[in-house]
Amino acid sequence: MSNNKSFVLRGINDVVFEERPVPELTADEVLVEVKKTGICGSDVSLTVHYLVAGRINDFIVEKPMVLGHESAGIVSKVGENVKHVKVGDRVALEPGETCRVCEACKGGKYELCPDVIFAATPPFDGTLGRYYKLPGDLCYKLPENLTLEDGAMMEPLSVAVHAVSTLAQLRPNQAVAIFGCGPVGLLCMAVAKALGARRIIAVDIVQARVDFALKYAATEAYLPPPFEQGETKIQYSKRAAALLKEKLGVEDRGPKGLDLVVDASGAEVCIQMGLFIAKIGGSFLQLGMGASEVTIPITLVLVRELNVRGSFRYGPGDYALSIALVSSGKIDLKPLVTHRFAFEDAETAFQTTKLGKSADWQGSDQGGDLWAGRVAVRVLDDGCMGRV
């Protein structure tokens, strides 16, 4: 059966709508009519991205691929073994099917499965179509007080939950600094606030983003200075970190130290600054994806015994906790949605996300409110969403 209009990336800057077959189900799978889908940075990042470069690091688009992976929708059909959801239920979709038998899967870290089938990661199709199928246990029924837009945003929120809660294990009354006030950085701040952090420092080079972060979840903010002539990146990062510590009263030890630093930007200087400001014995978590190789002050990591680790996607329990945090009112996702588009205008939505502003944007090119939020794309009757 073919009634599955989909938004397909065929090549660099080449996207079209195509009719695809409606997927056939196995006994353990669910067919979802997609209603909301977010546009992620991995779809159209401002640096390396599928839409313009046709690749993200080692993930290369070699054949036409349906875009999208941040989705929610309504259950259209269920396999005979699926009991926890039924036709008509509203669900959030966790878009990564793993093998379930490898060491990582059996050890409770399925995000590291080498054979994951992840939506809109080459060569696998994504969710930006009328229908999408996935294993039943990756469908999460939404509570009555959550919208389908909330459901679609569980994907990026789960990225933040995985980083701040699952891996970093942030505890109440701890202090955290987060570099990058884009959507994932903002969601990390929201998670930190929900977990009871006493201090949340937002760091970004765009004033509008910093202002939004302060309104949304941060308690303090820092706008790094410009480079000085002849300054290397590591020299700049050391100076900027020292200025942050002086301005905000951050110390290397004790209650004024930063228990956790998260880089959600991927920028080399942010990574360096983050390591410079983390307290002795503190933690640094890399979440943003930027250049494949960067220079870091490795001796500092050694002598301060910093706990440095990476965070990739999400794992067991992260979606469930994300839904609980929003359903209970501890996190509000609605301020992060800035625009909505019809499915037929998906290409415009992607371009808006890429540029960080819409065609009718009248503000400054230095950021503006769009940089601080998301673009929501309305797919089919109800929609898909994406971030700026």
Image (cartoon, rainbow, N blue to C red):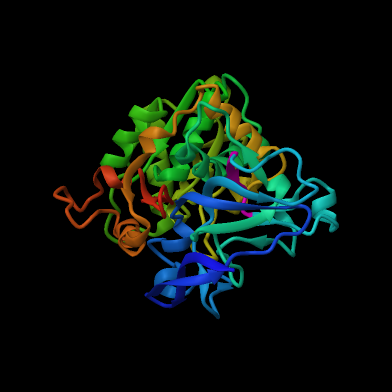
Residue 320, image x, y percentages: 65, 35
Q: Which residue corresponds to the image point at 39% horizontal and 42% vertical from the top-left? A: 181
Q: Which residue corresponds to the image point at 61% horizontal and 68% vertical from the top-left? A: 124
The answer to whether residue 132 shows anywhere in this view is: yes
The answer to whether residue 372 shows anywhere in this view is: no
In the picture provided, is 126 more to the left or to the right than 46? right
Residue 316, image x, y percentages: 72, 42
Asked where in the image residue 305 lies, by quadrant, the reply is top right
Q: Farthest residue toward the left?
A: 362
Q: Which residue corresponds to the image point at 36% horizontal and 41% vertical from the top-left? A: 337
Residue 245, image x, y percentages: 42, 33
Q: Camera-side residue: 69 or 278?
A: 69
Which residue range is magenta in the image? 89-95
Q: Which residue corresponds to the image point at 45% horizontal and 49% vertical from the top-left? A: 270
In the picture provided, is 325 more to the left or to the right than 353? right
Q: Quadrant of the N terminus?
A: bottom right
Q: Is residue 170 above or below residue 209?
A: above
Whether residue 90 appears in magenta in the rendering, the answer is yes
Whether residue 252 appears in magenta in the rendering, the answer is no
Residue 226, image x, y percentages: 28, 50
How many numbered circles are shown? 0
